Each structure stands twice: as structure tokens, then as C-alpha cells.
């Protein structure tokens, strides 16, 4: 009596459909891949009477000058609390110095229980768009949620 | 190639079967066997899929014109779906369609205003009864004068585009 051969369980992975699936996935992901990360910086531009800044909070006006220079004016209810002039080598150094100046402004006795929530930047003809964005980025990193650019020539 | 050689190569069961079959039919002739190393291929594919899945982004993306070099920012947020106004060194595009030369449009913004109005009307037709959110994506070259960007923002504000998303390169 011949011994019955034991049926073996085929536990091998089907590689062909697996490779097909992986190839399709690789193609899809390569096509939809994003190599440069484009982000956005939201500017809320006030229009007419619909001013964005709350009346109780202080606001910061930044007037860009020639590259590396700026004037910071801290205001509260249209009254100037402090004015600081900055002059640095480039936009990067200016942004760092602006951060320090803003911290000093927040520490003023008149700023007790007052937050700086909005900032408005006035551009200068010699300042590039890159410098403007660097300053706006610096303001956002300092916790100013409502930032804008003073438009010129608008109707 | 002998059977021992096949063992020495650490080939799989299927390759081993092929080798022995060829050896039997070839009566001792040298057999050339070309076998694709599937294990390493699958490994490579899996790693590629993992890497691409990690870098996959489902947020909307905006087309950046070739001659526009965007400024960098650390506090950039996600891109929102809105019309894209792109400013290269001399030309202005709205949703990849040329509007005109920037210096001319800053002096006489009529064609740009017309396009923006058309866009708002299209939006109002598609979303009846809803107020227009006034959002627009603005792409500008990092080296262009900031005053030109400010003038453009003035034109946009005049047309009730009050939420301007400045396109930047995120970190």
C-alpha cells in the first residue's frame, strides 16, 4: 500500500501582482510628489472702516526704510507709546533686532495687560519683496496674528 | 552549472527547479540562467513607496511660474484654493493667463480690474447667496520692489480682495 503524499500548503507570496501594485503606487506617488513646499502668509488688509485691529489692543507700525533699516512705532488708541529706529546690515539682522525691540516694547509699564495683536508694514522703494516678507514673517513669529501691508495707490 | 553551484548561489526554489530541469535536458551542457533578484527589487520598491508616501501632501498646490523666485518664510501656512495672481519681473498673470505688463497695469489697472470682476461674477454664479470671501493668492518675485507689490495690493483691496495669501517657500 503506497503512502499517500501529504499535500503541501502553498504559502508562497504571489510576487507578480505584488510588484504590479508597487509599481503602480510608485508611479502615482512620483507623479503627485511635491518637491518644493509652497506655503502662504495670510495678510488681512483693512478696508475703509472695517479696520482689523481691536481698539483695546496695541498695534505696531513698521516703516521699512533703505535695506536693513526700519522705524517701529507702537500705538494704542492712536497714541504713540514708543518709537524705535533700527539700522542693521541686512534684512535678516533687522528682523532679529526687530524681535528684540518688540520684546522691550511689550515690557513697558504702559503695556501692562495690553497685547500687541496687529502690525502694519509700510514698504519702501529700495526694499525688495523678499525683505518685506522677512519683516512680515518676523512679526508673525513674534505672535502678531493680524498683519498687513499698507497699500499704496489703491482706489 | 551544477546543482551544488545552484545551492551555493542561494537561489530560490523556483530557480533551483529551473536549474535542475535545464541540467537534465542539456546533458551536461553549460547553462546560462538569468534570474531577476525579486527580493531586492521588492525591497527597493517598498522603500521607494514608503519615502513617497511620507512626502505625499494632500493639501492644494499652486502652480509657481518658472521665472518667479519666491521669498522664504518660517511662519507659512497651508495654501488655500483661491485665484492666483502671479507677478514675475515684468509680467502679470491671473490663474496662469497673461494680463499684461506690470508697469503698465500699475499705471492703468483697467484690464486687471476687469479680470478680477469677471472672476467675482463667476464665483457669485457658482455660489449664489454667499458673500465673496475676498481671498486671493499673490505670488511675487523676491527681488521685485516691495512698493510694486504694495501698489498691487492697493488695486486688490479696491476690488474687495481683502485677504491676500502671499506665496512663500516654507521650511
Image (cartoon, coloured by chain):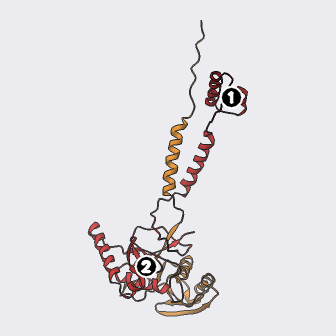
The count of marks equals 2
Element marked by disc 2: strand
**In the image shown, does B166 or A34 lie closer to the viewer?**
A34
**In the image shown, does B167 or A138 lie closer to the viewer?**
B167
Chain with colour orange in the figure? A
Q: Is residue B165 left or right of residue B116?
A: right
| Residue name at image x 59 percent, y 16 percent | A5
Q: Residue furthest top?
A: A1
Question: Chain B is shown in which shade?
Answer: red
Q: Chain of mark 2?
A: B
* Quadrant the C terminus of chain B occupies: bottom right
Whether A36 is drawn above or below B45: the answer is below
Tell me how far mark 1 sits from mark 2, CA to CA.
69 Å
Residue B166 image point, x, y percent: 47, 75
Q: Which residue is mark 2?
A: B91
Give the quarter of the image for residue A15: top right
Q: Is residue B59 left or right of residue B3?
A: left
**In the image shown, does A64 or B85 lie closer to the viewer?**
B85
Q: Which residue is mark 1?
A: B30
Q: Is residue A149 left or right of residue B32?
A: left
Residue B40 image point, x, y percent: 63, 43
* Quadrant the N terminus of chain B occupies: top right
Q: Earlier in the sequence, mark 1 or mark 2?
A: 1
Q: Chain of mark 1?
A: B
Residue B50 image point, x, y percent: 57, 51
Amino acid at each position: 500500500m503506497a503512502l499517500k503524499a501529504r499535500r503541501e500548503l502553498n504559502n508562497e507570496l504571489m510576487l507578480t501582482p505584488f510588484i504590479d501594485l508597487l509599481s503602480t503606487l510608485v508611479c502615482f506617488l512620483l507623479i503627485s510628489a511635491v518637491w518644493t513646499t509652497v506655503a502662504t502668509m495670510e495678510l488681512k488688509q483693512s478696508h475703509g472702516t472695517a479696520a482689523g485691529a481691536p481698539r483695546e489692543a496695541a498695534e505696531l507700525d513698521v516703516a521699512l526704510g533703505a535695506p536693513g533699516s526700519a522705524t517701529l512705532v507702537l500705538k494704542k488708541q492712536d497714541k504713540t507709546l514708543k518709537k524705535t529706529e533700527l539700522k542693521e546690515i541686512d534684512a535678516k539682522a533687522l528682523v532679529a533686532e526687530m524681535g528684540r525691540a518688540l520684546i522691550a516694547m511689550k515690557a513697558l509699564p504702559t503695556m501692562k495687560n495690553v497685547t500687541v495683536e496687529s502690525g502694519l508694514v509700510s514698504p519702501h522703494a529700495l526694499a525688495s519683496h523678499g525683505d518685506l516678507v522677512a519683516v512680515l514673517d518676523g512679526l508673525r513669529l513674534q505672535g502678531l496674528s493680524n498683519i498687513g501691508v499698507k497699500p499704496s495707490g489703491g482706489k | 552549472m551544477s546543482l551544488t553551484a545552484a545551492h551555493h548561489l542561494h537561489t530560490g526554489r523556483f530557480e533551483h527547479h529551473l536549474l535542475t530541469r535545464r541540467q537534465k535536458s542539456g546533458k551536461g551542457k553549460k547553462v546560462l540562467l538569468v534570474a531577476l533578484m525579486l527580493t531586492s527589487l521588492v525591497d527597493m520598491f517598498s522603500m521607494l513607496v514608503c519615502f513617497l508616501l511620507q512626502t505625499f501632501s494632500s493639501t492644494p498646490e499652486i502652480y509657481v511660474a518658472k521665472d518667479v523666485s519666491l521669498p522664504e518664510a518660517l511662519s507659512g501656512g497651508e495654501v488655500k484654493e483661491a485665484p492666483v495672481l502671479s507677478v514675475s519681473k515684468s509680467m502679470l498673470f491671473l490663474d496662469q493667463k497673461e494680463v499684461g505688463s506690470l508697469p503698465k497695469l500699475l499705471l492703468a489697472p483697467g484690464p486687471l480690474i476687469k479680470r478680477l470682476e469677471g472672476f467675482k461674477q463667476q464665483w457669485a454664479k457658482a455660489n449664489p447667496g454667499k458673500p465673496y470671501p475676498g481671498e486671493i493668492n499673490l505670488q511675487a518675485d523676491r527681488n521685485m520692489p516691495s512698493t510694486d507689490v504694495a501698489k498691487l495690493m492697493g488695486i486688490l483691496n479696491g476690488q474687495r480682495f481683502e485677504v491676500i495669501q502671499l506665496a512663500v517657500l516654507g521650511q
